[in-house]
Image: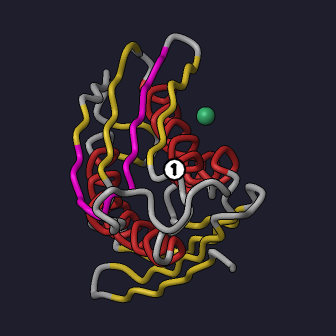
Amino acid sequence: MDRIAEVTRVTKETDIYIKINLDGSGKSKIKTGIGFFDHMLEGFAKHGLFDLEVKVKGDLNVDCHHTIEDTGIVLGEVIRRALGDKSGIKRYGNFLLPMDETLVMCGVDLSGRPYYVSDLKFTNDRTGEMDNCMVDEFFYAISYSAMMNLHFVQMRGVNDHHIIEATFKAFAKALDMATTVDQRINGVLSTKGTI
Ligand SMILES: [Mn+2]
């Protein structure tokens, strides 16, 4: 069964289309209007081996807030839809991702219960056209719209570009693990019988 979903969401602040194939090969076509954010989403697709199309027209004349937050909401939504009933998936995923001086750990549980915890700390306020405070806003939005438990622990890191890129890639690798189908799993992986 194809694990593909697409969502279009239009508000007065943003116009967003996202399509994901969880069983892809890392191909992406990304255009959000924020160069650094595009770079991060391309890395997410490449390292998670997801095929990802993201088209965003946001009110960047205000700032990057709505564009990045709403992209997180829609990305979470396509992940949730592409997973379907979650039968056969590993459900839990984690990754410890080094990038030069930076080391970021990510833990994911596709539990159906949204929860977000992060202790990311940045050196400066911005990276390129992206406000660094939007990294947590983005992943918080993903966590509630995909209904996943998502943790980030920053073990080390000084360079903001490295910290943010390590965060996106750690998430990609952890999500790839959590969404992987394991032939040994019958139905959903839960003693409760539902996730
Ligand atoms: Mn980079």
Q: Position of residue 143 (x, y in %)?
A: 31, 57
Taking the spot 22% from the left edge, 39% from the top edge, the residue there is 117
Asked whether 158 or 102 is in front, the reply is: 102
Among the 4 quarters of the image, the one containing residue 59: bottom left
Query: For the residue labelled by badge 1, is the local secondary structure a helix, a strand or a loop?
Result: helix
Among the 4 quarters of the image, the one containing residue 180: bottom right
Q: Position of residue 62 (x, y in %)?
A: 27, 66
- The local crowd at label 1, few if under 14, some if 14 to 19, many if 20 or more residues have their Cα within 10 Å, is some
Asked whether 65 or 137 is in front, the reply is: 137
User: CB of residue at label 1: within 8 Å of ligand 1?
Assistant: no
Q: Is residue 16 above or below residue 113?
A: below
Q: Quadrant of ligand 1?
A: top right
Residue 115 painted magenta: yes
Under mark 1, the amino acid is Ala
Image quarter of the N terminus? bottom right
List the residue tagged with mark 1.
178
Taking the spot 63% from the left edge, 46% from the top edge, the residue there is 43
Residue 139 painted magenta: no
| Residue range highlighted in magenta | 102-116
Q: Is residue 25 above or below residue 109?
A: below
Q: Position of residue 157 (x, y in %)?
A: 41, 15
